Image (tube, grey):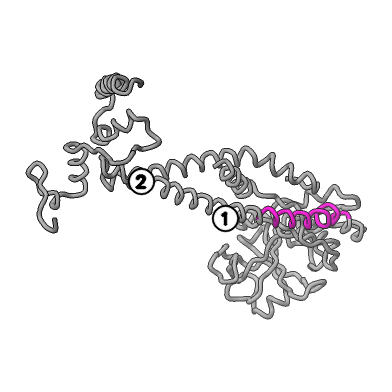
Amino acid sequence: MSSGEVFVNGKNIADMSDKEKSVMRRTNMGFVFQFYNLVQNLTIKENILLPIVMDGKKASGYEEKIDRIFIVSIFLSSFIFGRA
Amino acid sequence: MFTVVILIAVVMTTLTNGIKNVAATDIANSSAYDVIVTLNGEDMRASDLRDFENVTGALDSYESLWFGDYCTGSSRVYGIGQFNELNEYVRALRYDGDNLDELLRNTAHGIIVDEYWARVQNLSVGDVVTFFADEKQSNEIGNFTVAGFWDSSTGTTDRGFVGISLDDFQSLITDVPDKVLVRTSTPGSVVQAISERYLDTGIAAVDTMIGMLFACVVLGAIIIVCGIVSNLIVSFIGRKKEYAVMYSVCMSKRQLMNMLLWEFLFSCISVGLVSIVAGFALSEWFLSKAANGTGMVI
């Protein structure tokens, strides 16, 4: 593709400012990196909470939800691979 | 980080505490006085020398002041409490009569000047001259009225000795003494005794120590700057991938810059605070230990 426009939620991303683009990335998009990409100084939970905190929200409201996801993930991985 | 803190502490130690040099720069016999001690700072006064053997008296003397418009040279100024007392120390002064104290008391901001110099400058009693603290005449001390004359030709060639009342001296001139005049019957032994305490045994060791200390401080400062810059660069390069992840997932460029700035400020302030506290805490201990070997007073 050599030309064209990309719209997200009806907005042309070429017309967005850097701040608008960063807000769009952290509120409307999820990332699955091809390789392992975590901030090394933070725990897994803090890595997950990072976009929420940067969005100005309190992390405490999301911690319980993340804990539940962890438990399900551990259960599934032990079910699939036979160990946690 | 610890090494950087210790180095900054040494720098702070030297900058905040310093070394008080008690030595004089020159001690010599004189034809005008028995012994002149040229001071190196504020740490020695006439009172320190009165306990020496055969010293019958000592008097603080002060820096030269400059006359506006009248004289291209400077004048050594004495604050006169009692003329007889001054005359005891300064044999270069000759005065016919005994009402010098009275002349000064009766003249507001009065001065006594050398009679030959007054003739050359065409000064007579009642004329007003202006004193300056510097040769460029930018720092004015005040106006003074000629109250009388004396002869300062004996033992000196500049004829520039000036006397003002001790009250005027103390209120208008804030310079510290630069010389101490010593009265003694045995100038040779007194010069030797003062030199042993303030000159020969002290100043060379002090100069060497100051030189070494400042070399260490300069070296330390260079290492500190290089270390900090190196740490910042290595830290930035090592975390480039981390910044890229943060930028791609959730942060704007401005938020990234703010984060870096706050990290930098936090490092600088925390290191600075620890260094200042450590510097003050170590200063007395470090300097006194270092000085003990030379027998100096810190």
The image quadrant that residue B133 belongs to is bottom right
Q: Residue at x 54, y 38 (%)?
A: B274
Q: Quadrant of the C terminus of chain B?
A: top right
Q: Residue at x 20, y 41 (%)?
A: A25
The image quadrant that residue B211 belongs to is bottom right
B32 versus B51 height, above or below: below
Mark 2, other Cα within 10 Å: few <14 / some 14–19 / many ≥20 = some
User: Foreground: B214 or B62?
Assistant: B214
Q: Find numbered disc 1 in the image and state the secondary structure of the residue it sits on.
A: helix
Magenta residue span:
B193-214
Residue B222 image label: 1
Q: Of the residues shown, which amino acid type is indicated by label 2?
A: Lys
Please state the chain letter of the residue tagged with numbered disc 2 in the rendered image: B
Chief SS of the magenta region: helix
Q: Residue at x 48, y 39 (%)?
A: B270
* Same-chain check, marks 2 and 1: yes
Residue B241 image label: 2
Q: Is residue B158 visible?
A: yes
Percent position of residue B181, x then y: 79, 59
Find out whether residue A62 is within the magenta segment: no
- Tell me how far mark 2 sits from mark 1, CA to CA: 30 Å
Mark 1, other Cα within 10 Å: few <14 / some 14–19 / many ≥20 = few
